[in-house]
Amino acid sequence: MDEAWFAARLSHALALRERLHDAPFYRLVHAEADGLPGVVIDRFGDVAVVQPNAAWAELLLEPLVAALRAVTGVSTVVKNGTGRSRGLEGLAEETVVVAGSVAGPVAVPMNGATYMADVTGGQKTGLFYDQRPNHAFAARLARGARVLDVFTHVGGFALAALAGGASSALAVDASAPALALAEAGAKASGVADRFAVRQGDAFAVLESLGAEGERFDLVICDPPAFAPAKPALEAGLRAYERIARLAAPLVAPGGYLVLCSCSHAADLAAFRNASARGIGRGGRRGQLLHTGFAGPDHPVLPQLAESGYLKSLFFRLD
């Protein structure tokens, strides 16, 4: 398992992404599905962020990075050594630039908007590419709409919706640094005049908006993994149900509600049932229009159900 071994696998992964995308902004390696268990690599133009989440990858990081630079031509590589998986492997948490340099957030074009990815200090690798097709579907529903994007991170669904013609978007997140990046993305996208942010706990903000009598044409809730592992499944499903219950009353009649889960432990049926219960307990009825998954730069192993972790449900509410 030397540089040549890594280069063969990276070349295979790169061939798929170059066929899928006309610009070098994508997930390059999606762990087991790309033959590198425990390894995630996201590419941001000339910058790549590597997550060596398994002990073997940490041990062989040097030949992996050398092969990555040789195959892709990137000049800057960041090691993001954070997350629950590394703790399970007995690995220390650290984020370091192992090649090249990073001057600040990286501008990422996606779905007609510009996102700002903090590749050294942001959540995970700095941006979530997996939602790209779901951002695009939501943008089709957003023309002329008032949009609420809860758990927005760096602009998530909100910036895509504004690029798709939304009249306004309110982005909610608990993280002030993430919202600052979202505002920078709105400015870079030329939609700052239609973009607003609200910092706070998502559940509390949803309750406050309901008390204020607010209504939106499109509401999206894209929370972190409430059920990352099986022991958390029941509590996680209750949290997803609560999100749906609080969000449903905020949707104007005939409007749309998008509910997302990135929990490996919650399969599609369990998540869909929890969401439907929440909508009903929120006093609404809805049609399920579309079920979205991660983009094709996040391939799935049919033998490993957990690799198909992302679910996005699009409802139209009465």
Image (tube, rainbow, N blue to C red):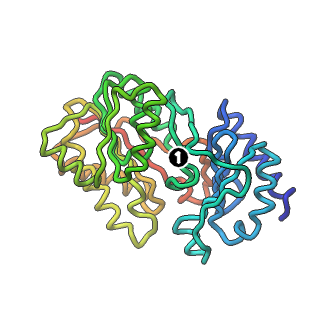
How many labels were placed on the picture? 1
Residue 309: percent from left, percent from top: 50, 54
Q: Quadrant of residue 269?
A: bottom left
Residue 225: percent from the left, percent from the top? 42, 59
With 116 as the anchor, is 298 left or right in this view?
right
- Residue bearing mark 1: 127
Q: Quadrant of the C terminus?
A: top left
Q: Write the residue at 25% across / 54% down.
A: 203
Q: Residues within 10 Å of mark 1 (few under 14, many from 20)?
A: many
**Residue sitting at 28 percent across and 52 percent down?**
200
Query: Quadrant where the N terminus lies?
Result: bottom right
List x then y, in percent, for residue 210.
16, 44
Q: Is residue 28 left or right of residue 166?
A: right
**Spot occupied by residue 247 in the image (x, y as percentages of width and height):** 24, 45
Residue 120: name its quadrant: bottom right
Q: Extreme front residue here? A: 103
Residue 318 visible somewhere in the drawing:
no
Residue positioned 81% across, 55% down in the render: 66
Taking depth in this image into account, of 28 and 62 the one nearest to the observer is 62
User: Tag 1, which secondary structure?
Assistant: loop
**Residue 87 visible in the picture:** yes
Q: Does residue 124 appear to the left or right of 143 in the view shown?
A: right
Q: Amino acid at mark 1?
A: Leu
Of 178 and 59, which appears nearest the observer? Answer: 178
- The correct choice, above or below, for 308 with respect to 285 in the image is below
Residue at 73% in and 50% down: 100
